[in-house]
Amino acid sequence: MKGHDHIIEMRLNRKVPSIVFVNDYPCKTDWSEFGEHATVCTAKDSIRNIDFRFLNGLRVSISSPAEQRAKSLYERIKESGATTIAACHIQASEHASNQTGWASVWHRESI
């Protein structure tokens, strides 16, 4: 996993990103250098071995070109304590307006 260290550093300084993008494909994770949205790359990582606790209380967007990995990330990040998750299986062969892959949005219930 790449890109999460800056989020952990922010959290230690009592700051949080407005949203975290978890991309399950190769992507840039130098977001903190340019003031962009927090981006974490999980490409080729074993999802069950990733520690997502740094996402506790945060809003998360998940994208993966593999439906099963998108679903696995979705479930693991729910367990982390994220407040809102939007996840999707992206189909690289289809235009953004023609996507028919799996997608789901989840909100943690208030206690």
Image (tube, grey):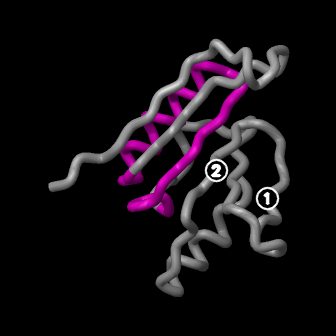
Residue plotted at (68% across, 21% down) = 66
Q: Position of residue 82 (x, y in %)?
A: 41, 53
Choose between 72 and 84: the one closer to the eye.
84
From what the image shows, is residue 17 above or below residue 56? below
Membership of 73 in magenta stretch:
yes
Residue plotted at (82% across, 75% down) = 33
Asked which secondary structure carries label 1, the reply is loop
Q: What is the span of residues highlighted in magenta in the rendered image? A: 54-83
Circle 2 packing at 10 Å, graded few (<14), some (14-19), many (20+), is some
Q: Which residue is mark 2?
A: 21
Report the amino acid beneath label 2: Phe
Residue that protrudes farthest toward the left in the picture: 111
Quarter the C terminus occupies: bottom left
Q: Position of residue 1 (x, y in %)?
A: 69, 51
Circle 1 packing at 10 Å, graded few (<14), some (14-19), many (20+), is some
Asked which secondary structure carries label 2, the reply is strand
Report the amino acid beneath label 1: Thr
Disc on res. 41: none
Q: CA distance from mark 2 to mark 1?
A: 10 Å
Disc on res. 29: 1
Q: Along the polypeptide, which appears first: circle 2 or circle 1?
A: 2
Q: Position of residue 91 (x, y in %)?
A: 75, 19
